[in-house]
Every structure is written in structure tokens, then in C-alpha cells.
Amino acid sequence: MCTMCGCGTGHVHMNGKILHDHNHDSAIDAHVHVPGMNESRRVKIEQAILAKNDRYAQENRHFLAGHGIFMLNLVSSPGSGKTTLLVETIKVLQDTLPIAVIEGDQQTDHDAMRIRATGVPALQINTGKGCHLDAHMVGHAMEQLDLRDNSLLFVENVGNLVCPAGFDLGEAHKVVILSVTEGEDKPLKYPDMFHAADVMLLNKCDLLPYLSFDVEQVIEYAHRVNPALQVMNISATEGSGLQQWVDWIKSGHRRMTRQVVTAEKTTL
Amino acid sequence: MALAENMLQIIEEEAAEQSFTQVSTVWMEVGRLSCVEKEALQFCFSAVTDGTIAQQAKLEIIDIEGWGRCMQCHCEMVLNTLYDACPSCGNYAIKVIAGDEMRIKELEVE
């Protein structure tokens, strides 16, 4: 069994089909007896637990850099408005940039269907009992999506503020979305995620007049965990702040494609 | 659970390379600033290793203290959380220099 992606257990699905078909032969028979080998000894290992995921992430990053694809990993609690934000962002950008989306959820393809309704290709990964996407799953999803050069790739991670923080997917940036209907102290309660992200989108700001949510306090908490975190106040449904977010995406995308052009010139 | 599965995979790969068939102890370094809950990891490890070469293995977790360096005054300090302020200057811009690791260090095998 490949323990990174759970393949062989049949739990992970992509667009409804089981991932995947290559062989992993690491399973060792627990009852094999090797003569002369049953003395107790110590074996040095020094291996990071996430080293394998990090290797897949580097492969993804290398592929993306080679094709000028700007990938963003959107992370948040469930219900923060990630899919609505994506749909609204796609509507603004789809006439200027080729876009694709990888959706991660434990079950259903509802989110991928919402994305496809905009006309943009979307691939749904169902993680079954898994609580996060990993770089191996995303690498396979990238292969299946037939990505265009110099495009924009959004990954909507499984709604969870804990585990996705530890799994690099090869993205250019993690973007954490926090809605104002949640608590101001979430950055302190779940510091790993706010530490790993480069941008925080404070969503549902249109609801602020009806809530006692303290915007300055949440930003102060977030900056305690990550002083370099860029914060944008938005409302995906009403459109406020979306221009700043879209401009940030465009400038990141331009940097990515410039890198490819520079690399091509160097090799010529 | 995914972390425990990754641990087992590393152990099984090492078993194939270094020819051992039983693991009696696993020493693992876990930093205080990593996202690992030690009791949960103990539980998941025993669940994942059931019926494998590591089913008898005792998981010994080596606690690694968190350390940070202040980006403003450059002093180094023990870091208990990712949102600690620098004890010298009060700044929050602190770079983690130790304590975010999750690493299998050594195995006792037969």
C-alpha cells in the first residue's frame, strides 16, 4: 500500500475514479524469518516524516515553474466561503487568463460542479476519510487536468485549519481564508496555518455591521503568528476588496511567467 | 493518521534496505512547534502498525524544545508557541530555528 496517498485502499477518488494504478511493493511480510538476522541492533534513520511529500511537492513546483503556471493553495475552516470566492475570482479573471481548479473534499463533487458552471475545468479529489490534500494526489490531478502554459491553477484544499498546514503541494503561496463569522482568535488557536500562509483573506466583510467581530484584533493576532502575512478585507458575495485580490494574483502570475521567459533566454 | 502512515512507510522501506523483520523501538524527534499531538500520534501509530513488522514497536517520542531568533534584535530564545513575543524587545517577528521537526531518528530492530 502506498501510505502517502492511500492507493490500494480505494479511499481516494478523482472525478469519481479510484486513484490509482501503479504498484508499490513496500509491504513486508511480518512473519518472514531470516536466519542469523534476529539479533537486536540499532539502525540510524534520520528521516523527516514528511520528506516524501516534500519530494513530490518539489516535483510539482518544478513542473509548474517550467510551464509558467501560478498555483495557489486555498486553505480555511469549512464554511469560510472558499468556493464562492473562487467562483467570483474566476468570473473576473477568466477572460484574461487560462484557469483550472483542483477541488479537495472528503465526499461529493458539488464544489467541482460549481466551478465547472463558470466554464473553467475542475477536477474533484475525494479524500474519503483523509483530512487534507497531499502533493502526490495533486501531482496526479495536475497530469489529468492537461494544464495550459502560463495559466493559473487554484487548489481548494479540504476545509481544515490543521493538517493542510503541514503538507506542501508545490504551490507558489498558501492563501488562508478566514470569515468574520468565526472567532478573532483563530490565528492563535490554529497558528500553524497562519504561519504557513503568505496571504490572509478576511471574507464576508459585508456582514460586519451585524457582528461584534473586531477586525483590528484579528489582524493583530495574525501578525503575532506571522508578521509578514499580507491581509486583505473582502466580501466574495458583494465584491468589495476583490480588485485588490485579483491584482495580487495578476502580479504573482506575471512574475511566474517572466521567470519562465528569463529561463528560456538563458538556455538559448 | 497520515503522519503515522508515513512513519510506517519509512520503516518498511528501511526494512527492505537494511534487512530486518521486526522493530522493537522507534525513536522519533517531535518539535514542540510541529503540528503533532503526541498522544494522538501514539494512538495512530499503534493502529497503523497492527499486523506489520512494527506491531510490537514501542514509540519513544523525543521532545525537542522550540527555539527562535528575533528578526529585530537578533537574540535567541526558547519559543513555546508560534506567537510568542521576543522577551528582549517585544517584537513578534521571530524566525523558528528549532522545534518544528518531525523525524524518525533511530530504530531498534531484529
Image: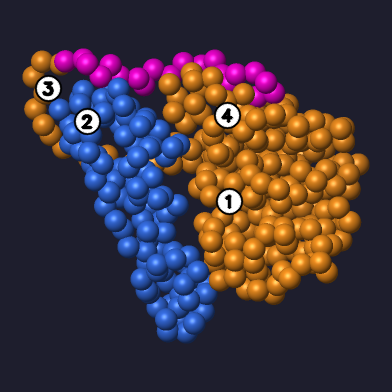
Chain colours: A orange, B blue
Element marked by disc 2: loop
- Chain ID, mark 1: A
Query: Separation of disc 1 and disc 3 at Cα?
Result: 45 Å
**Residue A249 magenta:** no
The residues colored magenta run A14-33
| Residue under label 1 | A161
The residue shown at (45%, 24%) is: A2
The Cα–Cα distance between marks 2 and 3, rounded to whole angstroms, is 17 Å
Q: Residues within 10 Å of mark 4 (few under 14, many from 20)?
A: some
Magenta stretch, main secondary structure, is loop
- Residue B72: percent from left, percent from top: 50, 79
Tell me which corner region of the image, top left, top right, bottom left or bottom right, holds residue A37.
Answer: top left
Q: Decide which of tag 1 and tag 3 comes sooner along the chain.
A: 3
Residue type for callout 2 = Gln
**Residues at circles 1 and 4 in contact by the CB criterion of under 8 Å:** no
Identified at 15% across, 16% down, the residue is A34
Task: Inspect the image, locate mark 3, and give the three-letter code of the amino acid beneath it.
Answer: Met
Q: Which residue is mark 3?
A: A37
Q: Is residue B105 visible?
A: no
**Subunit of mark 4?**
A
Q: Amino acid at mark 4?
A: Gly
**Label 4 belongs to which residue?**
A128
First along the sequence among labels 4 and 3 = 3
Quarter of the rendering containing residue A248: bottom right
